[in-house]
Image (tube, coloured by chain):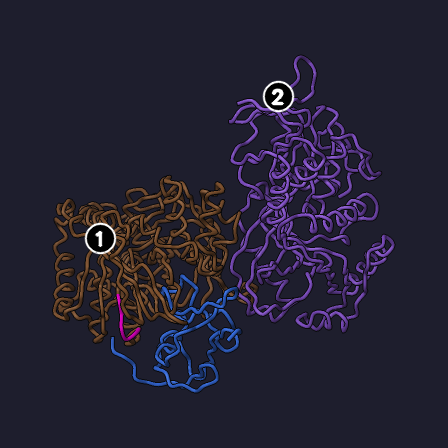
Chain colours: A blue, B purple, C brown
Amino acid sequence: MTQQMILESIEINDQSVQASAGQSVAAALLAAGVRIFRHTPEERAPRSIFCGMGTCFDCLVTIDGIPNQRACMTRIQPGMRIRTIPNEND
Amino acid sequence: MNTTADAIIIGGGIVGAACAYYLSERGLAVHLIERDFPASGTSRACDGLILQWDKLPGAELSLGLASQKLWRDLAAELDAEIGFEQAGTIFLAEQADQMEAGKEKANALSASGQRAEVLTPGELRELEPELALDLAGGVLFPDDLQVDPRRATLAMLAAARRRGARITTGEAVLNFQRAPGDNPAITGVITPGGSIAAAHVICAAGVWSAEITQLAGLSLPIRPRKGHILVSDIRPKKIHHPLLEGGYATTVQLAAEDVQVALVAEMTASGSLLLGSSREFAGFDRRVSLAVIRAIAQRAARFLPHLAHSSVIRSYAGLRPWSPDHLPLIGPCEQAPGFYLASGHEGAGIGLAPITGKLIADWVTGAALPPYANAVLPDRFDPIKGSKTNVLI
Amino acid sequence: MKTTDLAVIGAGPGGLAAAITAAQAGLRVTLIDESPRPGGQYLRGTGRQATQSIPRAEQRTRAFLQQLPHPHIDLQTGTLVWGIDDRTLALHGPNGNFNLQAEQIIIATGGRELVPPFPGWTLPGVMTLGAAQILTKEYGLLPGKRIALAGSGPLLLAAASALLAKDARIIAILEATHPGAWLPHVNALWGNFNRLLEGNAYLRTIQRHKIPYRFGQTVIQATGKGQLEYIVTAKLDPRGRPVPGSEKEIAADTLCLGFGLIPNTELAQLAECQHEYSTTRGGWVPARDKYLQTSQPGIYAVGEAAGVGGADMALMEGQIAALAITRRFNQIPALQRQLRPLRRFAVMLNTLFAPPLALNTLASDETIICRCQEVRAGEIRQAVRQGNHTLGGLKNSIHIGQGQCQGRTCGPLLTRLIASQTHEPPEAAGQFRPRPPLKPISLGALAQEQRP
């Protein structure tokens, strides 16, 4: 599989980032150095990609204002706004 | 192994648990038999709303108000987290005629000492900013309560256990023990684990009560009335009160019969949103109907447009024990002395569980009964064969 | 409403083989997959590798894939099957909701990885072998800088090979089983020499890179502040229990784990197909007749979704089911003959590499088991002690299995936890009962009127 070298402009936590077209949101986050995708509702534990195939629902981020999107199952689009869930206790 | 008890309760849902709670409180040796696990039936497939405005003034409302008081006491007495909240509820009027109906309910309840506040569309949206802009208004009932039915069931059983009640799970009642000869009295039950002798046997088996009463040679007019619930994940919280559509605006045509759908939205302690509701007769089929959950989603999206982005995580169907006159069957059965019914609550089982338990305890111990106890006697279906002269539907 | 002769759910090796085989006989086929591209998890994890040759199963899968687009196949990618009512499927795709009425259905929904939990397994940086392969092969992204792999079975080496093709720094590969356990199974290798050769190729690659490849070892703990920083490895005795005193702490920022696959049976369960428990096929699987039809007439199940066995087997099964549906029964015996050694090999692999039940003791009472609802092992063990010996019973007494993943991740773990506590066979724990939607869909999508 050849790698696409087309870059698209997306936003991660309000920061502009260049990401490879066709990547999953999870890959784009990791490539941008963002490893922690969310903090759990009860214990505020950090979570990231785990199964990578859409069955574990750990990699949930907010995309274009819509929460609970699986980062591993969503492809980036130009102008996409991605937000990870911070630990509100930090 | 043969044992004895003062009272046997058949069924470990919320009604059975309440019976165990109040009977054990009066010092009786209670043995509760649950064929699956506690709250495995309707008690875990329902919402936890305790309403008064859906009750007709008279016996029904009296039952409701008495039970409301008992729930408040229970919330304090039970040594466990049961998700109890005085959340109030809001009756939503989509059209002007529903608004009229809402005002009538407000008047009826005010006359009984319950608070009710009629809301203009503007006032409604101030309380619930997520609601659609084109509703006719609503009514706030601040005294309505909410509880987690599963937790409450388990908590009442735990309390009963602490007072010496025995609870057997995973065993069904195979038959009744009868008095010898022509005596129709029931003297106990037979289970796979052995027989249990008791002077009082209470059937709190919900929609499965008919199976049980058949063993006693009685037929019961209680039928399963199926309902659906969707569970949606919404963070942050988008609604502040349980919301209920005032009427059955939507009917889903299914092969067997029409299904009535009306919005009910309730937040749970864990942050998920329960969305109902539907009503149909479908026997004991608890499969989720795709057409019905679509219709519930549509009603939810109609009233709460921003909910469109929430994730529906799962759904389930429960069976309400429907009774022909919309009143439960609570009390002794003359045809079978020693046998009592505590069932037929339809959609009010959670709310009316405590008063049911208390009435059963009153009957069993010979205590004085409130006037409305008569209205719910099983023998009004005389004999318990499903017919009655004045059937109110 | 849309109708089709055959709906194939899942476009991995099994689903592709089934769809093409059926389409060749003139059937109208709708081929559905949740991913944007067909090929399944299998092809996401393939492509250029550090080994020289392309496995036969990959070649055959690509051969089927190359026959798309096909005039008789309506390919619906990015589409979720979220419900089923008799033979009507409820789907949600990029253009919205629609129903599909199918004469026959083939379920080819694949499998997912099993990871027995241990302290720290939820930390960012800890992921499955599959996740690591997808990041590397599909997106050209290394999951970390100091990568450890642990688990059991052939996927472990395949993942290592994929990572090495991108010059990953792998600090250790830990195979939980002991080589001594492999000897009784030699006869199952007969007829599976090509698989042996693949394994050998992976091994040579790892040796070439001088990566520590240890047997009878696994990771028993992961620690770090906010993300993975250290792993603790330990030797395992022949029963799979950590040997006290053998613990070693190693710095690692990524840990990739995989102990075999679990069949994705949720759709078959929702369709009310009867299931049986098979330890040699990955757990609960739908019961099937010799033509791979389930207990529901007109519903077939093939590939990993019906029993873990690899892509070769999925390809065979997809063809068999499609031939049965198109009534070309005379072509089936030859395929069934080829299937037999593949089944034997699968049984051998699954038996050999099955994670020992003792691995369930790795979870301390504080270890999270239900990742969605953050339920810890201690609470679960307490509930089991109180007599809740089934998944349904547990779900009733504590809040578990009701989060977004609907028990997919924790279900197999709970089965093993219960079994290790009660010493009853795993099937006694039963299954979670799936209900629609099979995966979360938005309320707006659910409320949408169907496309005509």
Q: Residue at x 70, y 33 (%)?
A: B27
Which quarter of the figure has residue B380? top right
Distance of label 2 from label 1 (alpha carbons): 58 Å
Q: Which amino acid lies under the numbered mark 1 shown in the image of this protein?
A: Thr
Categorize mark 2 by other alpha carbons within 10 Å: few (<14), some (14-19), many (20+). Answer: some
Q: Which amino acid lies under the numbered mark 2 shown in the image of this protein?
A: Gln
Report x, y in % for residue B314.
52, 57
In the image as oriented, which residue stretches furthest toward the right? B111
In the image as oriented, which residue stretches furthest toward the top? B181
Question: Element type at marker 1?
Answer: loop
Left or right relative to B37: residue B19: right
Q: Are callouts 2 and 1 both on one chain?
A: no
The one nearer the camera, B155 or C4, is B155
Circle 2 sits on which residue?
A: B177
Looking at the picture, does residue B38 appear above or below residue C230? above
- Name the disc covering residue C177, or none: 1
Q: Is residue C1 visible in this depiction of the protein?
A: no
Report x, y in % for residue C298.
38, 47
Residue C145 sits inside the magenta stretch: yes
Q: Residue at x 27, y 46 (%)?
A: C280
Q: Which residues are magenta?
A: C144-148
Instruction: Characterize the magenta stretch by its predominant secondary structure.
Output: loop
Categorize mark 1 by other alpha carbons within 10 Å: few (<14), some (14-19), many (20+). Answer: many
- The C terminus of chain B appears in which quarter of the rendering? top right
**Number of marks in the rendered image:** 2
The one nearer the camera, C414 or B213, is C414
Left or right relative to C32: residue C173: left
Residue B194 sits inside the magenta stretch: no
